[in-house]
Image: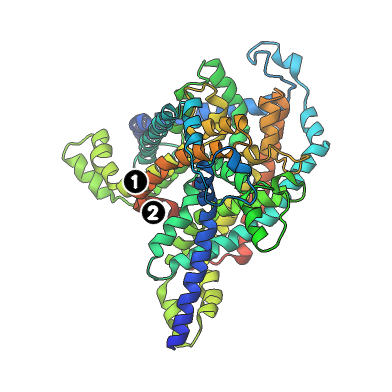
Amino acid sequence: MKKATKDNLKRQGAGLLTASPFLLPSLAGMVIFSLLPLLISGMISLTDWNGLDKLTDPDFFQKHFIGLDNFRAILTSKEFWNALGNTAEYIVLYIPSMLAASLLVAYLLSRPRRGIGFFRVIYYIPVLTSWVAASLIWKSVLAPQYGALNGILGFFGIEGPGWLLDEHWAMPAIVLVSVWKDAGFFGLILLSGIVGINKTYYEAASIDGAGGWTKFLKITLPLLTPSIFYVLIVGMINSFQLFPQIMIMTGGGPNGATQVMVERIYNYGFRYYRMGYAAAFSWILFAIIMVFTAIQMKGQERWVHYDD
Amino acid sequence: MTTKKKRNTICFYGVAIVLAVIAMIPFLWMISTSFKSRGALMSIPIEWIPEEPTLDAYIKVFSKFPFAKTIGNSLFISVSYTIITLLSSSMAAFAFAKLRFPGNSLLLRCYLATMMIPTQVTMIPLFVIMNKMGLISSYASVIMPSVFRPFAVFMLVQQMRTIPNDFLDAARIDGANVFQIFGKVALPLCVPSLATLSITTFMESWNDYLWPLLMLTDKDKMTLPIALSTLNGQYATEYNVLMAGSLISMIPIILIYIIAQRQFKDGMMAGGIKG
């Protein structure tokens, strides 16, 4: 018995010795780039650190520790609720339109038609474009007087709004750009789901005389729910982390109408140097993302079908 | 029956073309605007095709910004980032999938858990750490985080698990050590995953914004998106200049896409990383 455990220990030691050179780079990276920053971020969030005093000073915490004051200040600030409300507006508009657009893209690309490869390339070009370039291009398209969109609307006798300069239209405009940019990306994910559906279901439905629309509603959509679920989770997480398009197109304006959490964190941390406040803000964001992801995970049992 | 088929075909191409036009209009606008003179930007009615096309905007972009250098920076950073990601992640994945050591599955679960941490939580301390190490405005600051890529590890673990252990045992009996087994047996069998992963990683690094924005403050070190965003600050309303810069920044990635279209498709359909 004793010998057996000793052997076992020896084997475990040997196993660890063999595995360690393979794990070392990645593990070191995990500690330096993920775990250690996570720990420090938690500590900073409890301080009023302004980025100047050294974190390694022995009396750093005596001088700067303020407990949960940052969290209290953020959660009672109008600004936080404004940013959260803006994010909510974005999500309410973005998620359904993104889902509809990417379903359409996926459905079109799943048809065995001539020239489909061409359309795939076209739909994918917005995805390849960096967010910075896409935002610049759209800023120009959305320019109120000399932009393409209002020019096109003018053909139909519609006088377009000021888009990014108009408090009510700025967020919908950001949503429009995001849907345009993301539809190809999520469309391809959904396409792989459609391609994976067993063909015999469709054959059976055809024999029963079902039309194209019925087949889509009764077969494709239910069997696609795992992919749709994935798209919703990723889309939701991305929505909470909205950033480059805001920075380039509106900078949070006009009048705070497009301020969102990551933009606030960036400005507090790297423009106003309120590092403690920014760190606390980032933890609140983390918590919100976790809660929403958990809710979606829980909710999936009710509508996601796994076809095994 | 045939009329119905015809109607379906027209319907299909109709919708497909409308979508294609919506996808393309901003780019056509970008091209058109980039050839306009400063005055033509504000002509009413709008000049859909510039009446007197000029290269002014391109000349300005190249004279005000070391764009050739910037493209070089982007290429260097993205290629290094991708190579390190593939190397470090496939090594870790090999250990998780094929080596027995205590705490194996627990550690892998830790990897998955770290995927949930948003970058915003770690960016402030990481900024401090990089500052402390004197790495701000160095290539290393944006390349180094590639050693730890939990998503890549996870994807490669899935692939490595499909390799039959008999293959590895056969190599061991032939006298190969564990490093040779990794390099000569396991890695070649992962080539499909590595190919798609390299595309998604490259694209992610190529288009990355927030972290490089914090790190690459020196004009000579900037990547394309960061350089473009500084142009945005300087030429906020000179859209011809901004569009010329955007167009130049898109050319390399589109060329790569055309060359490696299949890997792009497979990579994107494997899902996951946001471009």
Query: Which residue lies under the disc numbered 1?
Result: B195
Q: Residues within 10 Å of mark 2 (few under 14, many from 20)?
A: many
Q: Quadrant of the N terminus of chain A?
A: top left
Left or right, B164 with reference to A104: left
Q: Check whether the beta carbons of the residues at disc 1 and disc 2 lie within 8 A of each other.
A: yes
Secondary structure under tag 1 reads helix
Viewer-side residue, B44 vs B131: B44
Residue B56: image location, x then y, percent = 50, 34
Q: Give me the residue at 49% from left, 49% from top.
A: A127
Question: What amino acid is labelled 2 in the image?
Answer: Asp
Q: Are marks 1 and 2 on the same chain?
A: yes
Q: What's the chain of the residue with tag 1?
A: B
Provide residue B108's location: percent of width, then percent of height.
Answer: 47, 41
Bin the neighbour count of mark 1 within 10 Å (Cα to Cα): few under 14, some 14-19, many 20 and up: some
How far from the left and from the top, in percent, is residue A22? Answer: 36, 32
Q: Is residue B90 visible?
A: yes
Hey, which residue is sitting farthest left in the picture?
B174
Residue B5 locus on image (x, y percent)? 44, 82
Along the viewing direction, whichever of B32 and B106 lies nearer the viewer: B32
Q: Nearer the viewer, residue B61 or A35?
A: B61
List the residue tagged with mark 2: B266
Vertical side of B260 occupied by A73: above or below: above
Q: Residue at x 42, y 87 (%)?
A: B2
Amino acid type of disc 1? Ala
